[in-house]
Image: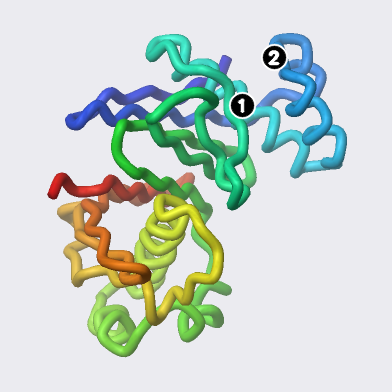
Amino acid sequence: MPLLESRYLPEQVSLAIWKIEEDDQYFLRLLDLTKEEEEEVNTLKGRRKTEWLASRWCWNALAKDLDHGPIVKDEFGKPCIKNSNWHMSISHTHEYTAVITAPLLVGIDIQKKVEKITRLAKKFLNDNEQEQVELSATPIDHLHVYWGAKESLYKAWGRKSMDFKQNLFVRPFNLELGTSKGTVEKEGLLEFDIRFEINPAYVLVYAVERHQ
């Protein structure tokens, strides 16, 4: 089983990363899906279905050590843990899926680096963030971290109607340090610690709500 790793971090944050090498039948044989999950997965086809199944199996691998229940969706369509006050988030890209859980608001993003992200930058970067990218020696890496951070903040907040430029903010960061801070400024202010790592296979970013 290609579970790349599971991590148990401060603030009771736990995450797992899975490399998807199996077909749908592998996961279907092992997963004990609820009726609601079966109905959802039956609406999916192709790679989307495989990624959905892999993310649930990755969650099972993590939740087994944490005694958490199954994943359901809340009123906003955000994945959440059934009958639990804990929070969780899911991401997948091509050959990888990642999940994170904590008693705090959390969001996670895993992505492969692609050059086309430069064409999307104006849609999610404000002027200050764009300036940081232009000053970077490796702007593609900076762009992927900014995108992953904002995706993670959006997932942690968990509701729709969010402007990535006007409501989500990521402070300047050093790529070598792998840390930053971010805020969600909508219906109040939420502050997050952001962690990221860049390797040849993927860029991983996750956001964890800060204690007030």
Residue drawn at x 19%, y 31% as measured from the top left: 11
137 versus 48 height, above or below: below
| Other residues around mark 2 within 10 Å, as few (<14) / some (14–19) / many (≥20) | some
40 versus 204 height, above or below: above
- In three-dimensional space, the C-alpha distance between marks 1 and 2, rounded to whole angstroms, equals 8 Å
- N-terminal of the pair, mark 1 or mark 2, is 2
Identify the residue position indicated by label 2 in the image: 31
Q: Which mark is residue 146?
A: none
Residue drawn at x 58%, y 42% as measured from the top left: 74
Q: Position of residue 150 (x, y in %)?
A: 40, 63
Per the image, label 2 sits on a secondary structure element best described as loop
139 versus 29 height, above or below: below
- Total number of numbered discs in the rendering: 2
Per the image, label 1 sits on a secondary structure element best described as helix
Quarter of the figure with the N terminus: top right
| Other residues around mark 1 within 10 Å, as few (<14) / some (14–19) / many (≥20) | many
Q: Position of residue 115 (x, y in %)?
A: 53, 71
Q: Is residue 39 left or right of residue 108?
A: right
Q: Which amino acid, mark 1? A: Arg
Q: Position of residue 143 (x, y in %)?
A: 39, 70
Front one among 22 and 195: 195
Residue drawn at x 54%, y 25% as measured from the top left: 82
Front one among 22 and 7: 7
180 versus 56 height, above or below: below
Q: Which mark is residue 56?
A: 1
Residue drawn at x 20%, y 59% as measured from the top left: 180
Q: Which amino acid, mark 2? A: Leu
Q: Are marks 1 and 2 in contact (CB under 8 Å)?
A: yes
Q: How is the image coloured?
A: rainbow
Quarter location, residue 138: bottom left
Q: Is residue 126 left or right of residue 117?
A: left
